[in-house]
Image: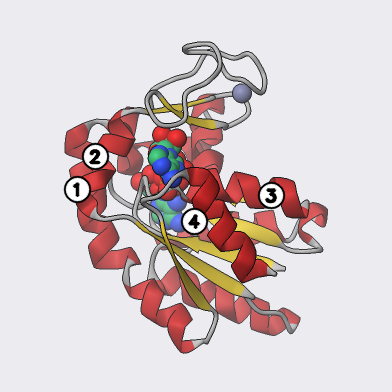
Amino acid sequence: MKIVMLGAPGAGKGTQADKIADQYGLPHISTGDIFRKNIKEGTELGKEAKGYMDAGKLVPDELTVRMLLDRVSQEDCSKGYILDGFPRTIPQAEALDSELKRLGENIDFAIDVEVPDQNIINRMSGRRACPKCNAIYHIEFIPPKKEGICDECGEELVIREDDKPETVKKRLEVYHEQTQPLIDFYDKKGVLHTVDGRVDAEDVFEAIRSILK
Ligand code: ADP
Ligand code: ADP
Ligand code: ZN
């Protein structure tokens, strides 16, 4: 089963992708997480990506597509995967599509998590992330058991550098311009499903579960 998560930055794609990964035993592939890991490790890819990410812009398609296609060709993806944060542009979706065609495969579900822009800033300003295991929390809505500490691995949680309100505004603009057209792209393929992302994360997951059944 191959799933694409769609939605604005902060809509809850990563949170839901984690739950789907747990329940269905599929790898959760977040291009943002892969970029952040490369930045932390100081790789060439990380150096190239960092400037774009800090400015709230997209990393160029060529680089991103190459990285993603390499990732999904790995052994743990043979039964499927959940893509979170990819594709983000029409050329990325087309590149994925033509690779899948070549393999005789296709995306089974594209799930759009809908949250209006006015709720997004709030979500992003309270987001805390685990730099070690990538677990996601919110200081108000989804707090860790112990303040500032990851429930899963005990690491200290961090505020993402690109979650500042100015950068979030830019990311939302980029989303509407470049990523939102993907909703139509997957709708035309007949695999689009929309869920209301404003409700509790558990309730969003219930809606997704009934789609995947
Ligand atoms: P969010 O969780 O807010 O949606 P991500 O962690 O997915 O953010 O992405 C963080 C940043 O990484 C993006 O703003 C962008 O700069 C870069 N990035 C991640 N995925 C892609 C992609 N598919 N194409 C281009 N840039 C990407
Ligand atoms: P995305 O991957 O789309 O950028 P995240 O999953 O990182 O979004 O969620 C953004 C922030 O909102 C995080 O702080 C997360 O804990 C919180 N969050 C996720 N889902 C919900 C929800 N249904 N209600 C309230 N807060 C949520
Ligand atoms: Zn952790």
Is 7 positioned to the left or the right of 57 in the image?
right
> Which residue is under mark 3?
21
The amino acid type, in three-letter code, at marker 1 is Gln
- Distance between mark 2 and mark 3 Cα atoms: 26 Å
Q: Residues within 10 Å of mark 4 (few under 14, many from 20)?
A: many
Front position among marks 2 and 4: 2
CA separation in Å, label 2 and label 4: 26 Å
**Residue at x-position 63% and y-position 46%:** 19
> Which amino acid type is marked by label 4?
Thr
Q: CA distance from mark 1 to mark 4?
A: 29 Å
34 displayed left or right of 81: left
What whole-number distance in Å separates the C-alpha atoms at marks 3 and 4?
A: 22 Å
Upstream in sequence: badge 3 or badge 4: 3
Q: How is the image coloured?
A: secondary structure
Which residue is rendered at x = 49% and y = 56% of the image?
A: 64
Residue where numbered disc 1 is placed? 118
User: Which quadrant, please, contains the N terminus?
Assistant: bottom right
Who's the residue at 58% across and 56% down the image? 206
- Decide which of tag 2 and tag 4 comes sooner along the chain: 4
Q: CA distance from mark 2 to mark 1?
A: 7 Å
Q: Which mark is residue 188?
A: none
Quarter of the picture containing the C terminus is bottom right
Give the answer, above or below, for where 202 lies relative to 174: above
Q: Amino acid at mark 2?
A: Ile
Q: Earlier in the sequence, mark 2 or mark 3?
A: 3
Asked if disc 4 is less than 8 Å from ligand 1, the answer is yes
Tell me, yes or no, if residue 31 can be seen here. Answer: no
Judged from the image, the secondary structure of the residue bearing numbered disc 2 is helix
Residue under label 2: 121
**Residue beneath label 4, please?**
64
Question: Dot 1 lies on which element?
Answer: helix
